[in-house]
Image (cartoon, rainbow, N blue to C red):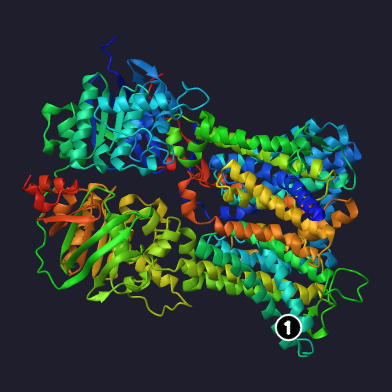
Amino acid sequence: MDDYPILEMKNIQKAFPGVLANDNISLEIRRGEVHALLGENGAGKTTLMNILFGIYHPDHGEILINGKKTFIHSPQDAINEKIGMVQQHFALVPSFTVAENVILGLKNFGFIIKTKQVEQQIKELGERYSLPVRPKARVWTLSVGERQRIEILKLLYTGANILILDEPTAVLTPQETRQLFSAIRKLVKEGSSVIFISHKLDEVLEISDRISVLRNGKNTGTLNREEVDRRTLVQRMVGRDVLMDQEKPKVEPGPVKIEVKDLTVKNDKGLTAVNNLSLEIHGGEILGIAGVAGNGQKELAEAIYGLRPIETGKIQMAGEDLHHRSIKKRIQSGLSFIPQDRKSIATCPNLSVMFNIFMKNTIPGLKKSSAWNIQIKQMHEKTRELIRNFSISTPSSKTRVRYLSGGNLQKVVLARELSSNPSVIIAEHPTRGLDIGAMEFVYQALLEEKKKGSAILLLAGELYEIFRLSDRVAVIYEGEVMGYTPPDPSYTEKIGFMMAGTREDSIHEN
Amino acid sequence: MNDALSFIVATLHATVRAGTPLLFAVLGTIFTERSGIMNLGLEGIMLIGAIGGFVVSYNTSNLLLAILVAMIAGAILGLVHAFFTVTLKINQIVSGLAITMLGSGISGLWGKDYIGVVAERFETISIPLLSDIPVIGRILFQHDLLVYISLLAVPLMWFFIYKTRGGMTLRAVGEAPEAADARGINVFFIRYLYTIIGGSITAIGGAYLSLAYNSMWIENMTAGRGWIAIALVLFATWDPYKALLGAYLFGGITALGLRMQAVGTHIPPDFLKMLPYLLTIVVLFFTSTDTLKRKVGAPATLGVPYSREDRT
Amino acid sequence: MKIKIEKRLNTPRYLSLVVPVVSIFAALLIMFVILTIFFMGRIGSFQGAFSETVSAYKELITWPFFNQYGLYSTISKMVPLAFVALGLSFAYKMKIWNIGGEGQLYMGALAATWAALFVFRGITSPILLITLVAIFSAIAGALWALIPALMKAYAKTDEIVVTLMLNYVAIFWVDYLVYGPWRDPKGFGFPGTAAFPEPAMLPTFFDGNVHIGIFIAIAFAILLQYIDVKTQWGFNSRIVGDNKKAATYSGIKVKKYTIISLVVSGAIAGLGGGVQMMGMQHRLMHGFSPGYGYTAIIIAWLAKLNPIAVIFVSFLFGGLLVGNDQLQMFYKLPISLISIFQGLVLFCLLGGEAIAAYRLKIEKAEEVPANE
């Protein structure tokens, strides 16, 4: 019986309106292996795994577990088949304790909750796999890394032996990633199988036994770790050779365009998120901020833009203090912001492309428009022009932007933000969730602005992106700049240490 | 002195009576909202409960059957709300308004031929020994059966919500439905269930008005109590004990207004009648800081339909 | 062949007209069933109940829409409905749920009465007096809406319950005045004030059967429509309505928009109260509104918040109110019939919209992989 692979997915097909997310995908997982699912955003990895976990139902295809055909209609069925999944957005109840989260939904507990025994078991489980947690802590007080450990322990507690980890390292420091990998190795040695979803090549090469590369909803094939290298994987992911290391345009730095001095900002929970931070950016310069998500990047961007009040410190644009300046005034003086959250901050999903382009009322080149007589026709014309210039793929300027793909939505944001001739641009994760083509477009657009003399603050999670665009790299940890490095991959190790909270000057001593 | 004391005792006794319909409505709605469904249809549900209970009591003189029918009527409106908000995912505010209109309309039509008649009512049951305690006995232990049930329901509900597996499931569904879903909990079923249960408990509050507080049917006899209850749910931050406090606070204001009219003051009665509504506004003002909501594990997805496909 | 249910990417234009119309008919149909059941309780036989319902429906439709005097009443009834619904639509565009139209209408009426009977007593120029009374009523409605507006903008208080509570307060306030200090001493104990002076009455036409309030409402509808499509305010309010975070990000002051939209909404509803006093009632009375403020919610919704459409839908509902009055008189039906109908329309409309978001797609048979 043991000859059967532990899991087989055959000819899985799943369409969403307008997209074929999974196109006849077959996949085989063996006992005791780490199987990587590699692919760009939108390649269909997450959809495939949501099907396996019973969240989506496939249009066609079947799933075999231990050689037996199985129907998975809901997560409950998946759990019964010992399949567990850690999703990108953690599935935890913030007000519950760790132990309560672990037993949520489990049937083999009495009507009245007793957590003492569970807490002990979780603790032991955590120690065994070097995934330390505090069972009595309330989840909302925990860091992202801890939350992820709880998610994994949840699966282990229910005895899952097929573990799906969806982009688990996106929120971790390099050091935490290593900790996670050692836990994965231990699990696999004990006979579990791990499906590791990622788009980071190095990690995939480090941890996997076999690798399946998805592209445009198709499986391009499963390969053994030994058979592949970076280059073959990239080719399979993208379908062509990618110009990996392009030259950055050389621009003579101009005067300081924006200066942040001793800035302190609080986050939504009222804790200090940006701590006495200072930086300055010249015209024609891109400053990249590297750091683990949640170390004050978002708060820094929002404070500069005026969305978040500042506690102490100063923000100056072209020598003028921005304090007490409304967002509208900041926009008018040439400050532009590309937020990470395209859907909930940067656009109005139910309004047309035209509305979203003219949302800030900053696009130049309209005639005879006043507050009491706006020229809708002209605005549509201008929008159509920008649709062409930014090659936005949309049926018309009247289409609601919720129907645009992530890449096209970001192009709408770029069209608005960049065509108002900004002098300072804050770009927060400008390529998150985009495919390589759209990513390249964003890179070119930002580099173009740099050539025109804008000062750009780039907040990104991916070091690749930071190296690709920046002139200088600042590493942020708990709202403080740990140090600066040149934008070169050879500094990765050093950046990793700084991301985990070691100061630049103390790295050499250790 | 004796007069003052008897005034106070009588007012407090009336407070409990006036607070009870609110308490039922608030407790029911705590269930509904804990699951993540906002129901603004309380006014309609209470009215349906009031007329449903009254008609059965009038025709059969069977009070338990009357309460049962009131609960079923409330459950049906809860089911309608659940169907529209959970399955069709329509705007919960508007669906709640429609429930209010439907409930008050149907109760008006149903009750058209029952205006001016009197039905069997819940009589006062004095609890032996306890009701003999001076002051307290009169205030708390000389009431009808429904008052005692509501008082018992408070600790039971608290225990259920915070200490049992069912309560944990309920809280998880309201606060983080995707987490519940990932653990194999059927979010849709739980939301249906508690919207229906919430509707039936709320309807008891309405039935209390026509079967205990009064023993007759008056069109729109809830007079905005359903809306006050909605405000009280926020005041109570979805906690049954605070619901008791809030309901009796409002009961107290109502009772005080009525008692003052009865003894005769120079304050015009219309202004006294405004008091509960004004107090609601004040209460809402002081409970509306969103930090307050965040800390206690509020149903964070209140008013937001759950859909697996929309999660990415 | 296979029939598949699929989510629509774009809702076709025609559906935004078809869905409301169909939902009104569906509501009338369900209502028919409810009424038949009700009459069966009274009459006892299905046949009798059915024919009773049919004749009630005939009355409901012919009198308000096809009879000259019925039509006059319909037009008069639609005026307060249109005003309140125009006001509510203005706020709903920004997803601000003002359900206090009833209270704002009452406060407008109260202020109009105060102005006409006390403050500007003695002014004889109709134009001047009518303008002053109208201004007073609009300000009163605005102030009544300012309370929830400030609470929402500065304390994030939910406006739904506050606006609703203020309805009760306004009604009790009016009750206090008409039963107390403002009661007409010559009114034989009737809870109402003395009549407005002649110059504070709106001009009429059709032999005095219809007052010019209808034209004021239409003028406001046109103005609001212009604001909606041609001004920066209209443009920005859509942004605020769709995504408040995006509005803040765009430099729009959401607080300012919240306050102004609620206040203007209240002012229009209040003006409706003033017009109702000057054109129709000519005196403030206990319970002068049979729930205009609530009916207006449905009107705004059915009209999809479009000011021009509000006028047409108000006409329809004005007629239904008139028809409902007839049923009350001749069939001993309660006034709450209109509430049932409103609830049903709302549900049919919402359900219809939810269903219209999907479409049936007929697929030709494909070669299904033979894996069974």
Outermost residue on the right side: it is: C188
- Out of B123 and B41, give the one closest to the viewer: B123
| Residue C250 visible to the viewer | yes
What x and y, as percent, mark residue C66?
A: 81, 62
- Out of C286 and A4, give the one closest to the viewer: C286
Q: Label 1 crowding class (10 Å Cα cut-off): few <14, some 14-19, many 20+?
A: many
Q: Quadrant of residue C170?
A: bottom right
Q: Which residue is mark 1?
A: C130
Q: Quadrant of residue B87?
A: top right
State left or right for residue C221 relative to residue A140: right
Outermost residue on the front side: it is: B1
> Where, quadrant-wise, is the N terminus of chain A in this rendering?
top left
What x and y, as percent, mark residue C133?
A: 72, 81
Dot 1 falls on which chain? C
State left or right for residue B230 relative to residue A481: right
Judge whether B173 appears above or below A249 on screen.
Answer: above
> Where, quadrant-wise, is the C terminus of chain A in this rendering?
top left
Q: Going 54% across and 71% down the picture, which residue do you hit?
A: C260
Q: Going 26% across and 47% down the picture, which residue do you hit?
A: A435
